[in-house]
Image (cartoon, grey):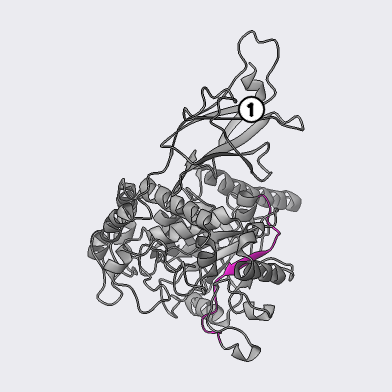
Amino acid sequence: MNKNYFLTACFFLISLGLVQAQNDSKKDFYDTNSVKEFRIKFEQKDWAELMDSLRLAGDGMLIGDLTLDGVKLSDVGIRYRGTRSFKTGSKRNAFNIKLNYINKEQNVDGYKSLKLSNALRDPSMVREVLSYEIARKYMPAPKANYARLYINEEYFGLFVNVESVNKKFLKENFGSKDNTFFKCAPHIDDMDDASKGCKMKIFSSLQHEENVECYKPNYELKSDDEEGWKDLSKLTKALAQNPKKISEVLNVDRTLWMLAFNNVLVNLSSYTGQQSQNYYLYKDDSGKFNPIIWDLNLSFGSFKNTGNGSDLNLKKLQTLDPLLHINNDSKPLISALLKNPQYQKLYLSHMRTILYDNFVNGEYEKRARTLQRLIQVPFINDQNKFYTTNQFNSSLRSTIGKRSKIPGLIELMGKRAKFLKKHKKLTPIPPEVVEVTVISREKLAPKDIKSFNIIAQVDKRPKNVKVYYRYDSTSPYRSIYMKDDGKHDDGKASDGMYGISLKPQDGQETLEYYIMAETIYSIEFSPTNYMFAPYTADLNELNQ
């Protein structure tokens, strides 16, 4: 065979494999209704010892081949993840897999880095997947599903396949990827910096430090520019000294969504819990930091410490205060924001939305049971699992373990939903945005309309109604009050019909917008998923 032809054929087959891997994943690599199959092959017989050594050394990867749902990817880098659940000799260590470790272009559907979580302290195996699924309704959050893992043809068990928070994630969710980026995961064992004048054991709580070196044991700078430490200092200083202007350096709405999520789901291995951890911070192109939630395998009360005293028992988890830490200056992201009456009202609105969307209606229970049915067989066949099949089967309704006492999801959230529903901070009835319309050009009208004339019918006597709007999806929203005065094609004054006319100044023809209505005690948005799917209008369509 001609040598050049042989090389060309090999290159074609390798390329075909890469393309096939990418095409297959178009079905959605993180589809939660399927279980992926990871088959790793190491040439080394002592690969397990080598993996332990690499993890203990803290650097490097072992090269192997990965067959992913039948598609082979060669020379990928593999190591155990740097989690506290790592144990030498264990077959349940979590994995970090770099598809582009050798071949820089190798990927699956654009994903070059894969993470396998071992679902530590989750007998139900649904905490991580379900929690991320709920979070993604309200904020940028990783995708997650399940994977059966084989190594050298041996079935190692069922793992959770979690999307990495990396440049691909940032680009897809924020439109940029190279701005200041931090991982907020404190080095718990590296807290001996008192000699530098640093505060002790404040973790990633965003307490202000005058010396930026004091931040380094508690935050990991993931972006390239060392100026990022100054950005972090600016954020913490604003929280400590000028919280009224915090919106200039922090996306407050996104932050309140994360805090509301942590509280409702009793996700205490987070900023809300003892060690103020497991989130990222990314500064978007508008100069504002955005928190990104991470590491949810201990949500739903699997981790029980708020930082105030000992671990909470089941009843205290079920009745966790919606305003936990409001007077705790060591949690400035909570206390500085929730002491602001408007931000507190917005936070409680987000809590109410998460509560009623997922828990009062029982949707979380249906989804948890569906996920367990999906993974039942691969879980039963997993000889390395942390929990028995009986514990898995009873994990939704019963506490598992005499020492860890991991609450059942339904056992926890059934009573928690009832508690929050009746809580005095969440019982005020919000206004109701009944209908939203944009007025079209009347038939036979001699001129086209050049303004967006928005009408909103709002019941339950709102104090204020605002429209948030922008003329392109890359710009920040602006806001303006809507009026119930009969002067904006909204009918009669004081009839519950609010109107506003928005006239583009630079010839724009499209509009994105959402409505916020508030009373003294509560806030309502329309649409409720305004952060991802606002209303839209187009002048060309309105003039047809």
Identify the main secondary structure in magenta: loop
Relative image position of residue 440 (x, y in whole percent):
60, 19
Return the residue found at the far bottom. Answer: 195
379 displayed left or right of 347? left
Relative image position of residue 264 (x, y in whole percent):
39, 58
226 displayed left or right of 384? right
User: Which of 31/184 is in front?
Assistant: 184
Residues rendered magenta in the picture: 175-191
Give the residue at x 43% y 79%. 87
Location of residue 450 (image quadrant): top right
Quarter of the image with the C terminus is: top right
Give the residue at x 47% y 30%. 496
Give the residue at x 60% y 87%. 193
Residue type of the residue flagged with mark 1: Phe
Q: Is residue 72 visible?
A: no
Query: Label 1: few (<14), some or many (≥20) within 10 Å?
Result: many
Q: Is residue 180 magenta?
A: yes
Location of residue 254 (image quadrant): bottom right
Relative image position of residue 487 (x, y in whole percent):
59, 25
- Residue that badge 1 annotates: 452
Give the residue at x 44% y 57%. 261
